[in-house]
Amino acid sequence: QVHLAESGGGSVQAGGSLRLSCRATGYDWPSSRCMGWFRQAPGQEREGVAFIYTGDRTTYYTDSVKGRFTIAHDTAINTVSLQMDSLKPEDTAIYYCAVDHRPGPPPRLCTMQSNQYNYYGQGTQVTVSS
């Protein structure tokens, strides 16, 4: 059974930084997979934020966070992190860790589409005040 344990998050003023972490256990680690983060603000749909293909560390970012957020993967402990700098009030949301662990050969391309990811963490709140 795949389990994603998130940590980090919290409240910060605009311009500040936060770091999220997500440790994945329970699957055929250290196989190469797409892992990353979605977020969902109140009244809005869940959106993809940042993803990484753990095999070669190729990264993908949604336009609104490029240059401010950095995703990384620690193979030794199978943990994906999201360093968030220059935070803005519009970054306020619940952030969810996700992994593509669908049956079959894992794709090397990580999309921002939620239907690619079949395991999610419980979510962690990020609040940015102006």
Image (spheres, rainbow, N blue to C red):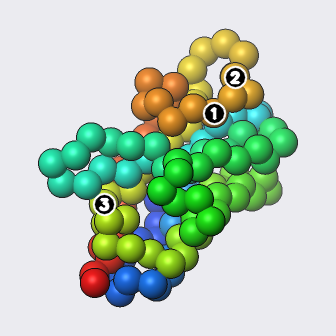
| Three-letter amino acid code at the position of disc 1 | Cys
The residue that appears at 47% across and 66% down in the rendered structure is: 7
**Crowdedness of circle 2 by 10 Å Cα count: few (<14), some, many (20+)?**
some
- Give the residue furthest to the front: 63
Asked if labels 3 and 1 touch by Cβ distance under 8 angstroms, the answer is: no
Location of residue 47 (image quadrant) = top left
Mark-to-mark CA distance, 1 and 3: 22 Å
**Crowdedness of circle 3 by 10 Å Cα count: few (<14), some, many (20+)?**
many
Q: Position of residue 84 (x, y in %)?
A: 53, 71
Q: Position of residue 95 (x, y in %)?
A: 39, 56
Which mark, residue 18? Answer: none
The residue that appears at 79% across and 56% down in the rendered structure is: 76
- Give the residue furthest to the top: 104
The residue that appears at 27% across and 40% down in the rendered structure is: 45
Asked if labels 2 and 1 touch by Cβ distance under 8 angstroms, the answer is: yes
Q: In the displayed structure, would residue 111 be above or below residue 80?
A: above
| Three-letter amino acid code at the position of disc 3 | Ala
- N-terminal-most mark, 1 or 3: 3
Which residue is label 3 attached to?
A: 93
Mark-to-mark CA distance, 1 and 2: 7 Å
What secondary structure is found at the residue carrying circle 2? loop
The quarter of the image holding the C terminus is bottom left
Which residue is label 1 attached to?
A: 110
Mark-to-mark CA distance, 3 and 2: 28 Å
- N-terminal-most mark, 3 or 2: 3
| Three-letter amino acid code at the position of disc 2 | Pro
Is residue 16 in sight in this rendering? Answer: yes
- Give the residue furthest to the right: 56
Which mark, residue 107? Answer: 2
Asked if labels 2 and 3 touch by Cβ distance under 8 angstroms, the answer is: no
